[in-house]
Structures are given as C-alpha cells and as structure tokens.
Image: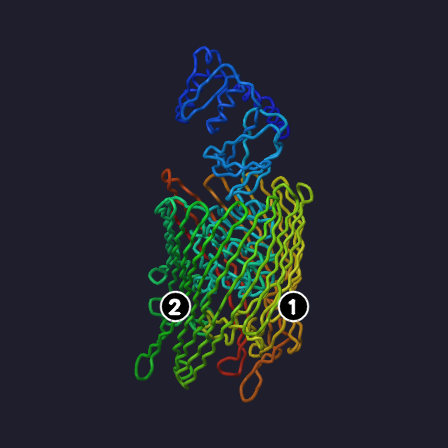
Amino acid sequence: MTRETGYVILILSFFFFVPRVYGQDENKSVELKTILEAITKQHHVKFNYLEEDVAGHAIFPPEARLPLKAKLIFISNRTLLNFKQIGIYISISATRKTEVRTHCAFITDENGNPLEDAVVQYGTTTLLTGKDGYFTFPKSVNQVFIEHVAYATKTYAVAETYGDCAEIKMIPAPHELQEIVTERYLATGIAKLKNGSYNIKPSKFGILPGLIEADVLQAMQQLPGINSIDETVSNINVRGGTHDQNLFTWNGIRLFQTGHFFGLISAFNPNLAHNIEISKNGTSAFFGESVSSTVNISSHPEDIERTSGSVGANMISIDAYTRIKTSPTTNIELSARRSYTDVIDFPTYTKYSQRIFQNTVVTGLNTNDDLYYRSDKEFYFYDFTAQVHKKIGKKHHIYVDAIGIKNSLTFTQSTFMPFGLIIKNSSLSQLTLGGTAAWHGTWDLHNTTEASFYASYYNVDALNSSFQDGGRNTLQQNIINDAGFQAAHTYNFNNGLKLKGGYQYNQITIKNRDFIDFPEYERDLRGSVKTHAAIAQAEYGTTEKPLYILGGIRFNYIEPFGLLYAEPRLSLTYKLGQDWQVSLQGERKSQTTSQVVQLQEDFLGIEKRRWVLANNNDIPVQRSSQASVGLTYKRNGLLISLDNFYKKVSGITTGGQAFQNQYELIDATGYYEVLGSEFLVQKQFKHFYVWLSYAYNHNNYHFTKLEPSVFSSNFELPHTVNNAVTYEWKNLKISLGSKFFSGRPYTPPFINLPVADDGSAAIIYDYPNGHRLKSYFQMNFSIGYSVRLSKNSNLQTGISILNLLNRTNTLNRYYRVSSTGNDIDRVNTFGLMRTPNVMAKVTF
C-alpha cells in the first residue's frame, strides 16, 4: 500500500467513523430520572415532581461541567418540562408558562471552568456572574460585552437561533496583546511575540544543543543576531554591540553581573524564572539605560501557586528551590545554588578553568603555564533568591524580592628564594546584592496601577600579590550603588487599545579605586548621575484583527548635565492573510553607564572591564538609533523569517571597545554603524524539529581622531550560522547542532621586531583589524530524559557535550613585547575544548 493510499483511507475513516461514533453517543439516551439523580449529587439540590411527568423521558445527558441552570435549560429544551428553583429545591411541571424567552450563556476560562466575577454588559444593563458563570439576557439583545480583571475583553455576537446556553470562553489578558507569532521558536518554551520580542519560559523549556537546563543567557545566543565573541555570557553581542550595552533586569532590579565562573555559566537560576522577555528592537518605552538589547526576567507569578520544590546537581554545582504556600493569599519562594569546585574537581571544572584563566595572572601571563596553587585554584560561586508574594483581596498584589550573586577566586603563587620559600596570595571577588518591593493593583475592568522601588549593589574586588615589580601588592575595586523608583498606570479600552503612562527615577553612583603599596599610589574616582523619565505608551491589537502596534515615547532628563531628550519606540506587525506577516520596528535609546578596559591586566586579567559613568566630556552619554523590517511565513510546521536592520550607536569610547592594538592606550570617542540581515528556517516532521539560522553583519567604527578613522569593529562577525536537529518523544529529548561564525578581526605587527620608542620597546602595527582569525566551528550535543517517580514528583536527567569534535578554536589574538624586549610574542586565547556535563534533578 502506498503512503498516499493510506492517507486516503485514514481520511475516509475519519469522515465515516467519527460521525457514527457521535451518532451512537447521541443514541445512548438515559432515563431522565437517572439524570436528575446525578444532578442532585453533583449540585446538592433536590427535585420535586410527579412520577407521570418525568416517566417516559429519555435523553442524552448534559455535560457534567455545565452550570446547574444551563443543565436545566438543556433538559427543558428536550422534554418541554418547566423548572422552577427556590433555594436548593427545584420543582418540575409538565406545563410550560407562556413567557418571553431569553437567551442564556455561561462564561468559562481557557480550561473550560466556570468563571466567577465576570462583568456582563448589554444595553444599559450590567451583570456580575456567580461561581457558575451563568447569566441570561433578553431575546432582543444581539451583542454582549464580557470583561474580567484577568482576561481580555470579549464581544459575543448572539446567534440568530437560541436554545441551549452558549459557552463563552475567555482568553487570559496577558496573552491577548502579546499574541504569539511562533509558539515554538528553536525549542519548546521559546516563543516569538507579536511585538518582535522573544519569550522564554524555563518551566516549559525543551532542549538545545549543549544545554541540559534553561540557561537563559546561553539559550538567547541561539537566536539570530545574538552571539558571544568569546563563548561567555558576560560578553554577549547583540547586533554588533558590546555586552554592557545590554540591559539585564530581574524583577525590576538592574543587574551588572550576569555570569558565574566569570562568564561561562549564567548567574540566573533556571529553577526560578517564570517568564523571560528578550527584545532586540522596538523595546517598550518603560525600559531605559540600554543602547542594544533588553533582557527582562520576571519571577512574579500572577496568582498564589501550590507548594512545590526541586533539588538538583550537575558537575559544577548543586541547587535547591522551594515555593511554599503559607496561606491561600501568600507564597514564599526560596532558591539557592552553589558550586562545589573548591572541594571536587570534575572534568567540566577542569575544562572551564583552562578556558577562563588562560593568559591571565592566574596562569602566569608570560608563560601561560599553571603556577602552584593551594587546593588547585580555590574557586567557587553561589547565588540565592528570596521572594514573598502577598495577595490582598482579588485585585492587589505585593511582591518583595532579594537576590545575591557571588564569584570568589583565591590562588597562591610560591617560589624558593635564597632565604626560603615565598608565598603570595591573590584573590578576586565579584558580588551582587539586590532588593525590590512592588505593588500591582487593579481598580476595575479598565484601570490598573503599579509601583516599585529597587536597590542594587555591585562590587568587584581584586588583590594581586605578585613576584614581579618588586613584589608589590595592587588592590582594585569597582563599586556600584544603583537605586530607583517607578510608577505606572494603565487604562484598557474595550476595543483592544491600551494606554500606559508612568514616571521613573534612578540614581546611580560608581566608584573606581586603585591602590599600589610600593611605590605608594592611590586613585579614587567616583561619580553620580540622576535620571528622570516620563513615559507614554499605547498598545493596540486583538487576536481577531491583523494589525498590532506598540508605540511609545520616553523623555529623559539627566540631572548633572542638564540634558533633556526624547526616545521614540515603535513595533508594528500586520498579517497578510493566514500565512504571511510583515513587521516594522524602530527605536532610539540611551545609557549613562558603560564598561571600559584601562589595562588588560586589571582585576587579574579575568574581569578586566570596569563600570564607569558618563561625564558628558570624554565619556559621553551613549545613544542609539535602530530600524528594522521583517517578513515571516508560517504554514504546516514550516517557519521562515527574514529581518533586515540598520543600527548606529554614538558616544562610544576606545576604552569601551577593549582594543589590544595601537589604540589600546589612546582615548577617543566615536560611533559604530551596523548593517545586517537575520534569516531563520524551521520545520517540524512529527517528532523531529530542524532549524537553521544565518546572520550577516557589517560593522564599522568611526573615530575622527584616529588614523584611519573608519575600520572594522572588534565585534564584527560577517557570517554566523546556527543549526540543530531535535528529537522529542514522550519523556526523551535529543538535540544535535553546530555553531559557525567568521573569525574575529585582529591587528598583526607591521614589523616583526619591536622598535625603540622613548627608551622602551614598542610594536608598530599594521592596518587596524585588517586580518581575521580562522572561522569558529563548534558542534554540541544534549540528551534529556524524565521519569515520573510518583503522582507529584519527577526525576529529570541529562547529558550535554560542548565542542563534541574537540576542535581547537582561536577566540582572540594579540601581540606584546617579550620579556627580553627583543622579540614580539603572539598570544592566542582558545575556546573550550570538549566539555561534558551531567545533571539530575528531582521536582516535587
């Protein structure tokens, strides 16, 4: 039998067999008395009737989930009996009264459960549904409006005929305007929204190559246009930008530290986040302090949830999470994660160490050989969160959250001197603490208000005790205190229009301190910036209409500089039939903070970037302008999307671009321009999912004080290709994929020997960024399997392998004068070699 013949038989079977099944069910009539007995038990009522009135009636029973009154109408329409209810007693008579017949309906949620407290409006009448969601309305009414605080407004067009009660199913409000363009984008749990942003739900996360958990910062690098030029989550480049140009928030708290292990692991615990939204363009006007992408992480549930928890471990860390429902109106959530790398060394830790500590003080900058360490590099990290969610009545929510993130490294260098053994202890600590309190209130069907306050503290602290330079000690600190307040009010119209306005205040203080004990030197720089923002935003769109618009404007006032400027934002999509969709996005954004590299050996050469504040002079306020246009086709499991964009960011500094060539010690300001395209094709074949993405990027610097003034950006990757094949069947998930991108630009010496320059040896460089490294290629693999242990508990297991083929990838190359002063050393930084990881987690 051919496949086509099989399909024909299957279709014919469907058309002939399914109607017979329903017909047979309709013929399975039940005596009315039996139906009444079932209703009595379910709804706790009592029927009064004469036996002769009920006898002889046999009908197909109404659905058990229907409200009581809907069941009575259902029976009445089929038996012509009259029902009259007084309290728990219902009398049945054989004679129906002559009356003006009315329509009836009942309102349900997305799962088919009756919806209480829904407001029903028709004409000048307003009704409120009870627990059964049931209501009636006159025959003359042809349109009914239904509203609910947690659901999108619904307009119900009454059918010309009437009979049984109509079911009106409501759609949750958070999903009405944020309609999903693609339910599954690359993997389960990742969706593309109508406003152009990407949504990740860790609780639903499937699998991606090389990932066994929902690491949001690793997962976002699979999206077209997002990459990391050095494999870390602390250097994520979105459409050619630098990492500090991305805004990362957790429950409204701005975070300046995003990675553990100095960038190889995300600092965000995957057990916790309920919702993550990533925006590359067309960002909401309520987000500032970013000229590139926005990553908004929210772990605020919409309602009080049941008690649950999890305990897990992999070859780097252990973690625990619990949500406790202390009362019907209160949730407490706690999470913690800690590495055990200071106690046990697994192969994963060894590979990570080789990657992150190469060409740093830790490994000996000149030789790249490991020095002697106490306890084999005492490194560990931890993070924790604590959250309280209090529901006041049905319309008000209070959230109080706290977060902590830390990396800690200590190591010992030792050497024998003529007078004995000398030991030097060095350390690096990176700490983030944050807290927030938020309130969200719903006044009525149209008005909601929210307000929040947050504070964030960041400190990176390094002590370098070396044998070089006379054995001096160097202390370096970068400290940030960030606090802010915001309030917003939203008004919802019945036609899909939503208006939102608000105010934000932020004050940030940054301190940079350097201290050298011999010869004694100290530098202590600090600055503070206050920013006020007034925001207005409109959002329009319904699931029934093809047009969606999110537009807003943000007015920023930078208090120390007296700067006042506007930032418009726009995201527009329009459906062209059922399969095609066109999108247009544009925005202007700014930021007053940035990261710079003053010396490549700062902070032991590991976390060498430090945060600084704009001073409206040699460090300007950075501003960006971006526009993009896209086209999407989706049909029968096939998705094709194409986005073309232009982006310009002004106010950048040479220090912020981390040059390692002739511009390393030169201070200049300028801008970069990016022109690019992003393409994705994705297809589903039963249990297989296949996708391939391609990104083109042309990124040039413009520095008028440099010669040449225009040259390739340090972060230009002309071609990037990601692909994967994923198989999901029941509890098994397997994913194999690869990543390819063009080699990073670098600047070789023009002359292969150093030349004298003011009494010291120096390198004469070739044209800046005129050469490229070999292309990067990495193949990754993941497999996951889950087992149900009991009714409420599961065991999740997984194995991942990064760089499956063990390919040597060169991530960076720079040059320096050798220790003898007679030669030039070429220094390469290599990517991760084959790195396995194993995880197990029990959820309950």
The percent coordinates of residue 540 (x first, y second) are 62, 49
The percent coordinates of residue 527 (x first, y second) are 49, 75
Mark 2 closeness class: few <14, some 14–19, many ≥20 residues within 10 Å: some
- Chain-order first, disc 1 or disc 2: 2
User: Which residue corresponds to the image point at 55% horizontal and 34% vertical from the top-left?
Assistant: 168
User: Which residue corresponds to the image point at 57% horizontal and 68% vertical from the top-left?
Assistant: 557
Model colouring: rainbow
Residue found farthest to the left: 420
In this image, 451 relative to 630: left or right? left
Query: Where 90 sits versus 452, above or below?
Result: above
Mark 1 closeness class: few <14, some 14–19, many ≥20 residues within 10 Å: many
The quadrant in which the N terminus is found is top right
User: Which residue corresponds to the image point at 63% horizontal and 57% vertical from the top-left?
Assistant: 695
Query: Element type at marker 1?
Result: strand
Query: Where 120 sits versus 1, above or below?
Result: below
Q: Toward the viewer: 551 or 123?
A: 123
The percent coordinates of residue 739 (x first, y second) are 56, 56
Query: Element type at marker 2?
Result: strand
Q: Could you tell me the amino acid type at mark 2? A: Leu
Residue 287 numbered tag: none
In this image, 607 relative to 763: left or right? left
Q: Toward the viewer: 2 or 506?
A: 506
Q: Which residue is mark 1?
A: 700
Residue found farthest to the right: 576
Residue 45 shows in the view: yes
Q: Toward the viewer: 62 or 739?
A: 62
Q: Which residue is mark 2?
A: 409
The percent coordinates of residue 19 (x first, y second) are 58, 22
Q: Alpha-carbon distance for marks 1 and 2?
A: 37 Å
Q: Toward the viewer: 337 or 680?
A: 337
Q: Could you tell me the amino acid type at mark 1? A: Asn
